[in-house]
Image (cartoon, coloured by chain):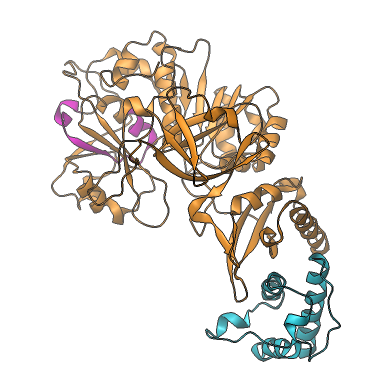
Chain colours: A cyan, B orange
Amino acid sequence: MSGGVRSTIVSQFEQVAREQKRKLAPLSDDLVLIDSGLDSLCFAIIVARLEDTLGFDPFSVTENVNFPVTLGDFIKFYEDAAK
Amino acid sequence: MPPNDTRSLWDALDGATNAAEQRLWAADACIALQELNTGSSLDIKVSELRGLSVLIAASDQLAAALALIQIDGIARRLILCPPDLDAAHLPHVMAIAEVDAVVSDRSAADFSAARAARFVPCSRTVITAAGGRGKQEATEWILFTSGTSSAPKMVCHTLSSLAGAIQVDDRLSGAVVWSTFYDIRRYGGLQIFMRALLRGGSLVLSSAEEATKDFLVRAGSHSVTHISGTPSHWRRALMSGAAQQISPEYVRLSGEIADQAILDNLRAVYPRATIAHAFASTEAGVGFEVEDGRAGLPASYFAAASGGVEMKVEGSSLRIRSPRTARNYLGTQSTPLIDSDGYVDTGDILELRDGRYYFIGRRGGIINVGGLKVHPEEVEAVINRHPRVQMSLVRSRKNPVTGAVVVAEVVLKPKAALTTGSDNAALQRQILEACQRALAAHKVPAAIRIVPSLEVMPSGKVARPDA
């Protein structure tokens, strides 16, 4: 299951970067999201798409959540919510 | 020339030369207006209602139509209760409108909340009896706004403001048969009801209980020539597979933004009809009509006042000053309907492109994507241009990054209905690409869902969660 979440997230990053004509930095767990080449609209779209594909939005569960800093944090955040 | 308030609807019929052929058709009944014309007193004991504030609360539209014809010019005030008014709002309505009498085909017990008011039954039957109508009252007409959630606002009109866009001197000859998808107790439907009464012709009433297809078959059987509805009504008609059942000369859209896609679709189905889209609202009255087949309106409309209607754009929204606007909202707590210069702010946002103004949405409906504004309707207009799309609804979805994003729900045309998931995915991608080509990045839907249908409210407008 956790592998499914990871691959879904990675493919959304790639998909949105293509659509928004952004040059995506090589994806690794320690990639800082603001250095990924994506802007905040891209992240907003990724979160909305993930809600549709995964069926949940971890940001809506907790009120005062800090946005993940690295890609690894981001994936873990979704994986934890999927448990 | 528009009528003045020294004449009532009754007088208009009384003076009509062709009333003999005028009929009101409901789904299961028909009234010849001549029956009203020959008698001087009627079903309703109109003398009991002289000078009173009268709530017309019939469940049957035909009974309501007859009541309006009989009581205009007798009552001090007529309140047109829409069929879907929430009963919980009734005590508030009765108090604000100072209702003295309730005219209804329902049981008096349904109005027990209105203890002080007299109850007068009405029906579809016309009973001819002796006795004159007596002196003419200048009746105030109260309509409800089609707002969604909270208590509806009550808007004050007169017969002359309501009929201001109707050329009463120009009575239509030949077999004119009017119809409308609207209920006649809403502004859009009332316009067609009054056109039939004041300019001549019969009227085919629609009904909330009747399927769109059945209504179109019935309208076709009466050879409807002039028919109106909202763009959502018309999209539903196109989806019903029965649009070809009518072959009107005149097709009118109002109440929502008429985008190019719906105008083109109607043009294709009714090649010989005049396809007109009108701007009208309960508060601002009929502003203008556009008949060139294109969305929006020429900027030249703002230079020359037509029919006494003056228009301007201020703070991006359309403002209208004319004898057709309502005067005020009923109730002391209410905000002014007209500004100090006499203009009604419609709240409809216009954008000027190449000498033409386009409606891009409502002031209250704006979605804020990270500080950038999006009007749902401008995105819908792009989506609706896709040849397989029948209609769409764009709304806001809460988002942790930008506060909100734009998402879209799309209904496909009947023949384009999809069976396979991969076909769906391809279509979603095409729609997305079309949006990316036409719109700024923040206006492009983050997610597009294909849905079987969208909710249309009793007012004929698509249900907007943010409205």
Count up the numbered dots: 0
Drawn side of residue B143 relative to residue A31, left or right: left
| Residue A71 x %, y % | 75, 86
Q: Which residue, as the protein is rendered here, is positioned at the far right?
A: A26
* Residue B30, above or below B412: above
> Magenta segment, which residues?
B45-66
Residue shown at the point (34%, 16%) measured from the top left: B13
Drawn side of residue B222 relative to residue B264, left or right: left
* Residue A15, above or below B84: below
| Visible residue check, residue A21 | yes
Q: Quadrant of the N terminus of chain B?
A: top left
Residue shown at the point (80%, 65%) measured from the top left: A19
| Residue B177 x %, y % | 51, 21
The image quarter in which residue B327 lies? top left
| Residue B414 x %, y % | 71, 47
| Residue B9 x %, y % | 32, 21
Q: Is residue B345 magenta?
A: no
| Visible residue check, residue B451 | no
Front position in the image: B298 or B422: B298
The image quarter in which residue B198 lies? top left
Q: Is residue B47 magenta?
A: yes
* Residue B26, above or below B438: above
Residue shown at the point (28%, 21%) measured from the top left: B8
Q: Which residue, as the protein is rendered here, is positioned at the far top?
A: B17
Front position in the image: B422 or B110: B422
